[in-house]
Amino acid sequence: MFLSSVRASSSRIPSLVNGSRMFSSTCRRMDKAPLRASAETPTPQDLLSKIGRNADTKLEGFNESWDKLNELWMRSVKLYSLGLSVKERRYLLWAFSRYSQGSTPSSFIKPPKPPKKFRGWGPKIQNGVRVRE
């Protein structure tokens, strides 16, 4: 075989095997799959209510049709004008991406993090008790 004469670390292997270069000079564009109705979420209102964190009230103008919700998903710049915080925007975009990949909302919904019970300074305070001074 012709590959036995070429060393494993040789830079000529990709050109010999494929006959083409291994890298591309064009930028990679991530295509977003549109949001569609499923058995668990037949309407956009159901999807936003299952996502939780008051998404159905915060995105009230976009819960009428899948086209409006897809417009928000495809052009995520519109989330800035709604006055959502960074955490809310990131969570919504994450949930939309999981849903557009085919996952059901019941499989990926996470409750929000509870607030911290103790404001600590590292090892000074442990379980609410001051250890060092």
Image (cartoon, grey):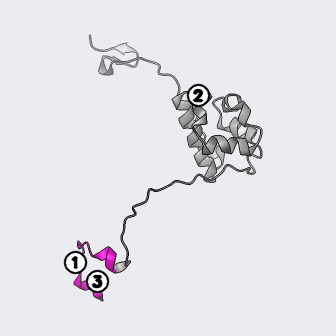
Residue 8: x, y in percent?
A: 24, 75
Residue 28, image x and y in percent? 46, 56
Q: CA distance from mark 3 to mark 1?
A: 8 Å
Label drawn at residue 59: none
Label 1: few (<14), some or many (≥20) within 10 Å? few
User: Sequence-wise, which precedes: disc 1 or disc 2?
Assistant: 1
Specify few, some or many for label 2: CA neighbours under 10 Å numbering under 14, 14-19, or 20 or more.
Answer: some
Residue 44 vs 21, above or below: the answer is above
Q: Is residue 9 above or below residue 126?
A: below
Pick out the residue farthest to the front: 25
Looking at this rendering, what residue extends furthest in the top direction?
133
Q: Which mark is residue 84?
A: 2
Q: Name the residue beneath numbered marker 1.
A: 7
Is residue 112 in view? no
Tell whether position 17 is magenta: no
Residue 51, given in percent of the width and then of the height, sits at 65, 37
Foreground of the two, 132 or 66: 66
Callout 1 amino acid: Arg
Image: magenta residue range: 1-16
Amino acid beneath label 3: Leu
Q: Which residue is mark 3?
A: 3
The nearer-to-camera label among 3 and 2 is 2
Residues under labels 3 and 2: Cα distance? 57 Å
Image side of residue 23 versus residue 98, left or right: left
Q: Splitting the image into 4 quarters, where does residue 110 fall?
A: top right
Residue visible at 75% across and 51% down? 39
Residues tagged 1 and 2 counted as in contact (Cβ below 8 A): no
Kind of element beneath mark 2: loop
| Residue 12 magenta | yes
Earlier in the chain: of badge 3 and badge 2, it is 3
Q: Quadrant of the C terminus?
A: top left
